[in-house]
Amino acid sequence: MDWITHDEDVWFDFRGDSPKQLTPGRYYKGTVDGFADFGVFVDLAPGVTGLLHRSELDRRLESLDWESGDTVFVQVKNVRSNGNIDLGWSIRQSESEFRGARVHDPDGDDDGEPIDNGSSDDGPTPVKKTPKGVSTKSRVGNGTDATEESGQTASASEAAEAERPEEDASAAADEASDDGDADVTEATEEADTESESEFEFDETSAAESKDGDVSEEPAKVEESTEIEEPERVTVDSLGDRVGDLVRIEGEVVGARQTGGPTIFEVRDETAVVDCAAFVEAGVRAYPEVDEGDVVRLDGEVELRRGELQVETEELTVLSDEEAETVETRLEDALSEKARPETVEPLASDEAVEAVTDQLADAAEAIRTAVLQSRPIVVRHAATADGYVAGAAIERAVLPLIREEHARADAEYHFFTRRPLDDPVYGMDAATNDVTQMLQDNERHDEKLPLVVLVGVGGTTDSLDGLGLLGVYGASRVVVDAEEVDTEIVDEASVLVSPSLTDVDAGGLSTGALGANLGAAVNADTSDDLAHLPAVSYWQETPAAYADLANEAGYDPDRTRELREAVALEAYYQSYQDKRELITDLLFEDDGGLAGHVSEQFRIKLGDEVETAEANLETREIDGVSVAVLDADSYSHRFDFPPTSLLADALHRRADDGRSATIVYSTDELFVRADDVDVRADDVDVRAAAADAREEVPEGGITAVGIRQNRVEFLSGAREDVVDAVASAVVDQL
């Protein structure tokens, strides 16, 4: 194979997977991976990356006109024993400057085969430099015109060419001819490099006369290459415009600095696109452009590693009427795009059907946040019911985020689910959220989030937390299947609750309401969410939701396993969202994972309940049987199950005709009454706490965590408080 002797005349497409397969001395086509103070990292193949040290460059690293993702040509100088690859500079940075191209496929049949340079490849688009002398704005982002500078360079080049004796050029040509083809190629490369560095237009040389006079042709070339004002297009049409110079108008919804260019995320009425603006490696381009600015951007549409990107030529911040026109266009399109056309309940449920307009409002708020690149924070209780509701919304929103943003980490950046161990959105949780959002806003110019409270924001216990969010202007969507306190209506930006209608919510669970909200946000995920309502009910699952789950392939045993598995995982690391694990359980599992975890649930809960039942104290109060358990003495603290879940299990398993169960610990107790499911809404715990407070004024009795029927008190008055609360509960039965 005679091509082996001419390795340095061609470039190679490396298709191996190990640095040891590279051949030192060859030129390879690569992709810029990143920049460092000491050089540039270049990918030659997936997992095969070399370093082009700054000492190998023929210019300063800061002046290198490369960006991350650009296609470049480098020479492999050395492959070290540890796998590190030392790269060398190639003055040839286009395929046409090489004498050919070959495949380097160490383990394949194509090794050594020629490559058609004219054919397209699947790699990144090569760098397209703005020719000097073209009347267009410079890419460096300083707003200056490049024509003046290039004109000076052209003049200097012309003068130098005019002074060069004709015989010198002839002698150089004769000498190059005598040295053979290789030397001709080298001389050509050197001449091309000089020409490119000075003017970058072959027409300059062509315009020179034999006697050294410089014609007026360069000025005509400059005039003839005047770039016309590009056509305004929409972002969703860019896929059909690769290689075109276009204009887009929209809002800057994000800006980040990479090791190479500055990346502006620009949203118009159709979608969001990354726009790269380069001044020099790691330096902020257009520092005057901030997130939220309405801009007009001209640039060339390119593909970078399979993703659309606009190479910015000019970026202008709009104001006054121009900005207002664009903003109105964006707002109208946003409202039309964000509002769901219809809201179809997952199953026949009178309570859900009564709140379809409210669900549409909440869905519009969530979809608008996605379109505005506004982070979404979902807060829910760290219970099986809460996790089902939160996971349903997550399942619906993430595909929308992926569709809207090209960034690989967008779904983690723009969506966060934060469970609450205490199902109240109090000051502790609100302070955490406000601190995080202010830091993100200050450090990363991130927009204030949309906070969605599912089953945790509907009572006065959450007023202070909601108020703190309101002080900073964060939007709040409250979704609650139970009755909400009237004070919450004014604090919520959007409120979804059957209690705002004339319909009795009955036994609607937070999980069922959350799943219906997820379907309203993204109807394409309805099939994925169909089984979730049945998972959220601990007992007496409504027939409509049981049938819906069966149709989706989830029988009662499987929904029970899912419920138990999620309840167990919700307890451990309760403040963590466990996104991937919960996704595996609820959506990706074929039964093996849920079966394994639910078995642990039953073992742990069974052991605790068995111990607790052996130590229940049964009291007869006015003819009503009340079971009382000292959880501090007869359950394992800081281990599964939590006290609230233990109280639920004890009351569900009661077979002695008792009407109420009270489980207490050091300074709190939980009340469960007859016919109470996990929500425990048949007892007015506030009224019971108020009556007990009159009996034991020194006990510091306060009803908190209404959704759990929880009462807090001072530990020194514990015995008296338990007696008083038990009597108050019986009075309600």
Image: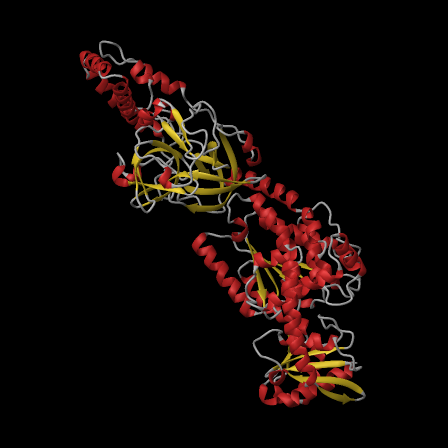
Quarter of the image with the C terminus is bottom right
Tell me which residue sits at (54%, 33%) in the image: 238
Confirm whether residue 294 shows in the render.
Answer: yes
Residue 503 in the image, given as x and y percentages of width and height: 80, 62
Give the answer, above or below, for where 208 lies relative to 687.
Answer: above
Q: In the figure, is residue 523 to the left or right of 403?
A: right
Confirm whether residue 566 shows in the render.
Answer: no
Q: In the figure, is residue 566 to the left or right of 126?
A: right
| Color encoding of the figure | secondary structure
Tell me which residue sits at (53%, 53%) in the image: 412
Q: Quadrant of residue 596?
A: bottom right
Quarter of the image with the N terminus is top left
Residue 311 in the image, given as x and y percentages of width and height: 44, 34
Give the answer, above or below, for where 594 lies relative to 409.
Answer: below
Query: Across the whole image, how many numbered discs are drawn on residues?
Result: 0
Q: Quadrant of residue 36?
A: top left
Q: In the figure, is residue 516 to the left or right of 193?
A: right
Tell me which residue sits at (80%, 57%) in the image: 544
In the image, 332 versus 516, the foreground residue is 516
In the image, 600 versus 396, the foreground residue is 600
Residue 277 in the image, given as x and y percentages of width and height: 41, 38
In the image, 661 versus 119, the foreground residue is 119
Give the answer, above or below, for where 104 lies relative to 505.
Answer: above
Q: In the figure, is residue 240 to the left or right of 221?
A: right
Q: Quadrant of residue 160?
A: top left
Residue 355 in the image, given as x and y percentages of width and height: 74, 56
In the image, 274 versus 159, the foreground residue is 274
